[in-house]
Image (cartoon, rainbow, N blue to C red):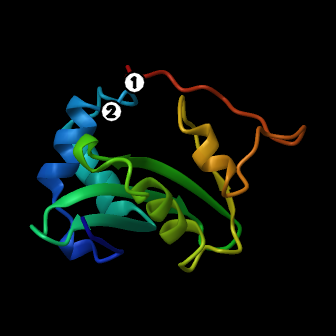
Amino acid sequence: MTYSLDDDRDRLDLDAIWAFLSGEAYWHRWRTRAQVEAQVAGAWRVVGAYDDRTGAQVGFARAVSDGVCDAYLADVFVLAGHRGHGLGKALVATMIDEGPGTHLRWTLFTADAHGLYASFGFAPPDGMALVRPGQFPPG
């Protein structure tokens, strides 16, 4: 299989993104479709992964950033049938190493794939990092 990745917002398949984030992701599944669409529309940068045979979107990542110092990597996924081909690594590389944010301090939250993210320099926070946990779903 061959794949292509790009940051063309017009190419994103919001139905595919919504299907994964609302039905398969373990994180923030309480979001409505309108909220997910607002997050995608308001993202500093998005990257999609596509199956070259069919053109279907099979992976996604989005980032929130001030574009100057800091960026937050979110909603990174590869559909199950397309895992094992390096797409997760390619999505992260495209987002953080091959775009306008190579110089930024990147953060993320994840319950898995620590090895993947460690290969890009992500590490547990140092003594300067503090996190105020959210209340999800809000209410």
Q: Is residue 114 left or right of residue 26?
A: right
Residue at horizontal 19 percent and vertical 44 percent from the top: 18
Q: Is residue 33 visible?
A: no
- Give the residue pinned by disc 1: 138
> Which quadrant does the N terminus fall into?
bottom left
Could you say which disc has been placed on residue 25 in the image?
2
> In the rendered view, does 9 fall on the left or right side of 74?
left
Say which element carries label 2.
Answer: loop
Q: Is residue 35 above or below residue 53?
A: above
On the image, the x and y values in percent for residue 94 come to: 49, 71
Outermost residue on the right side: it is 127
Image side of residue 80 versus residue 138, left or right: left
Kindly identify the residue that appears in the image at 26 percent across and 31 percent down: 24
Q: Which mark is residue 99?
A: none
Image location (x, y in percent) of residue 76: 42, 49
The amino acid on which the numbered mark 1 sits, given as a three-letter code, is Pro
Above or below — where is 5 with respect to 32?
Answer: below
Query: How far is the residue under mark 2 from the one under mark 1?
Result: 18 Å
